[in-house]
Structures are given as C-alpha cells and as structure tokens.
Amino acid sequence: MNEEKSTTKPENTAAAPAAIAPDTAAASIDPGEPVAAEGAPLHGAARLRALGKSLLVAIAFVLVGLLVLYGASRIFEPKSNGNVGGVHAAHVAANGFLGEPKNSLDALFIGDSETYSAVSPVEIWKAGGAATYTCAIGGQNLTYSRTLLERALKVQKPRVVMIEGNSLFKPFDENKLLKSTIKDMFPIFERHDRWKALTLRDFFGATENDYVDDMKGFRMKWGVRPADDSAYMEPTDNVAEVPELTKSVLAEMRDMCRAAGSELVIVSTPSTKCWYTSRHNGAQAVADELGIEFIDLNTGDDAVAIDWDTDTRDWGDHLNYAGAVKTSQALAHILSERYGVPDHRDDPAYAVEWNRAVRHHDRLVEKGSAMAVAGKPGDAITIMELPPLYNPA
C-alpha cells in the first residue's frame, strides 16, 4: 500500500527578517561626528554643547599644564642671584645687576666675551662717575641678550643700553629663538639642572637678590700676545649681512628699551679678529634701518687708540686689562658727553656701593700687575676669572 504523502509544508522556525523602510535604511556615520546614545548624529544645539564641552576639557587641560610649569618654575628659579647650585657662575656674573640697588644703573653693556673683556664699569666710574654694569657671557647671541635685557628692565631704568655689535653676526634659527622664549616664560626649562641642589627655601622661601659683584660683570685679564693689525679695518664697500631674524630680535629689544625710557645703541668694542670694515658697514645699515645709533670703537671719530702690540691677550681677539682701561675711559666720555649721564662720585647714595667696588678692583689690579711682572711677557693671566660673591649682610 502506497503511503500517502503529506501536502502540508513543514513550518519554518526561523524568524523572517523585518522589512526595512527606505527612510530608515542604515547610513554611514562619520566616526568623528558627535552621536547620541542611540547612535544618531547630533545636530544643532546638542552638537554645539558637545563641542563646547570638548573645548572646555582641552582648555582645562592646558591651564593645568601651565600652572604646573609655573609652579615648578618658581621652585627651580634660584631664590638668590648668587652662587647657587645648578647655575653656571658665568650666568651669575652676567645677572649680577639683580643685586644692584633698584633703578641705580645709568647704562648696561650686553654682549659676549668681547664685552666682558673690554668694558670695566669700575674704570668707567673712576673716569666719569657713571654707574654701569656689564651683562655678558662667552658666545652670547642675541636671544640670551634679549633675556638679560628683559630681566634688567624689571629692576633698572638705564638711560642707555649698549649691545655688542659682534652679537649681530652670531646666527641663530627659529628653533633656538622659540626655545629661548619658552625658557623666559618658564624658567624650569633653563634651571632644570638645579634639582640636586633644591632646599626647603626653594619650595617656600622668597627671592632675595643678595649677590653683589664688585667688578660689575667685568673680567680682569692680563698677559700680552700681540696682534697683526696690518689689515685691520681696511676700507671696503662690502657689507656683512645681518640675518632678518637677528634684525627682528634687535627691533624687539629697541622697542623694549623705548617703552622703559632707555635708548638702545649698537657698540663695537676693539678687536682685530672679530671686527672689520664689512661688519662695520653691515651694523651701520641695520642701525639706519631700525633708527638706532651705532658707535664703532674700531674706526672713525670714536676709535680707541689701542696698541695691538701691548693691549691684547690673544692676538687681537680680546683686550687685556690695559686695553679695557682705554676702552672704558672712552665709553665714560661718550656716556657723559653724548647721553648726559650724570657723575655720581659725590653722591652719598652711591658712595658705599661704588667706593667698595673701587677698593676691590684696585686690589685686583695690584695683584694682577705683580703676577704679570713675575710671569713671561706672553702669559695670559686671569685675575678672578669669575667674580667672587659678596654679601653685604
């Protein structure tokens, strides 16, 4: 008997897919687009609120970071301008103006080793009574010169600020300028090496600028190594180029000085190795462009009568003490006659500070003279390579 086949179809137990309406079809969503909890894109006010919240979070994050840097900078910034751990002694001397009585300096000299070898503020004082300071470290370029100027103008209001012309020809790039700017804003990036020398005073103490440099940034150096000056300042129409970035920083320094009631001046100290006529021409062109004065102590009416057989310690690169005396006396005359800087030698307000400096200076001159006589004629003798600390307390 044939078995009867069922005509009933077996029931499909799988769920039938739901129909998708055309207007709710799945669409791609930008992964960067704010979405609601259900996955739908935000629009209008909701989108603005989400973006505003993200912006506030970013701003808060930046502010917290800046506060941390500011707090750390306060801790790492020395609480004394004297001989503190992690701060190179050359920078201590260059920043010694912080220990001078407020608004007592008539002029600042900012530059490199040419400056600290040639400009003796004590000799300037003895010749004309101007209160000055030499802010210089070896190899200094204009980025750090700007830093020193900014610091100085917070505590001093000099009539004149003289920047070494040799600095105009020490190139730097945008990266170095940016780093210098960041260090100015957050000193921790300059002082981070001080972490080993931190004390409780760094965390809780106030800043006390108690370091006084009786040499006022000058470094007294003896010894004679004559220079070949046969080609010194030979005439030429060539013009040494000053980079545009350098000119922009110099213009910024000019504006800083003008805002403080000071006058920025370019000055070139005597040197047969670092200075020649093409650089004179380049510095003069920049001075004319920026509307500032240029004083060249190597040539023309302002030339200092340097004897290159006796007044240099390293074949014409830097001056020795004898050359520094001549240069400083010339600058004393310029400050008095050209810029009207007063003579403070009879002013009781300056007597204690500068009479002490003169005594200290003269003791070192006596010591240096004796050592130079005892040494060989060509020996380069340094008296007080870096100034000692003096604490009036």
Image: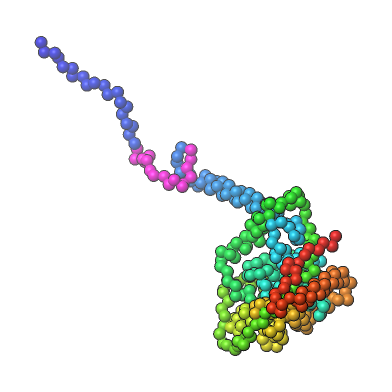
Q: Residue furthest top?
A: 1
Left or right position of 257 against 366: left
Q: Nearer the viewer, residue 119 or 247?
A: 119
Image quarter where the C terminus lies is bottom right
Q: State whether the magenta stretch is mostly helix, strand or loop.
A: loop
Q: Quadrant of residue 81?
A: bottom right
Q: Where residue 197 sits in the image (x, y, percent)?
A: 71, 52
Q: Where residue 230 sits in the image (x, y, percent)?
A: 62, 87
Residue at 75% over, 49% down: 200
| Residue 136 sits above or below residue 332 on the image | above
Q: Nearer the viewer, residue 322 or 262?
A: 322
Q: Nearer the viewer, residue 227 or 259?
A: 227
Q: Where residue 232 sits in the image (x, y, percent)?
A: 62, 85
- Numbered range of the magenta stretch: 21-37
Question: From where the camera sits, is residue 262 visible?
Answer: no
Q: Where residue 280 sits in the image (x, y, percent)?
A: 62, 82
Residue at 34% over, 40% down: 22
Q: Quadrant of residue 163?
A: bottom right
Total tally of numbered discs in the picture = 0
Question: From where the camera sits, is residue 227 visible?
Answer: yes
Image quarter where the N terminus lies is top left
Residue at 56% over, 46% down: 53
Residue at 60% over, 62% down: 179
In magenta segment, residue 393? no
Q: Nearer the viewer, residue 159 or 346?
A: 346
In magenta segment, residue 36? yes
Q: What is the image's colouring?
A: rainbow
Q: Quadrant of residue 151?
A: bottom right
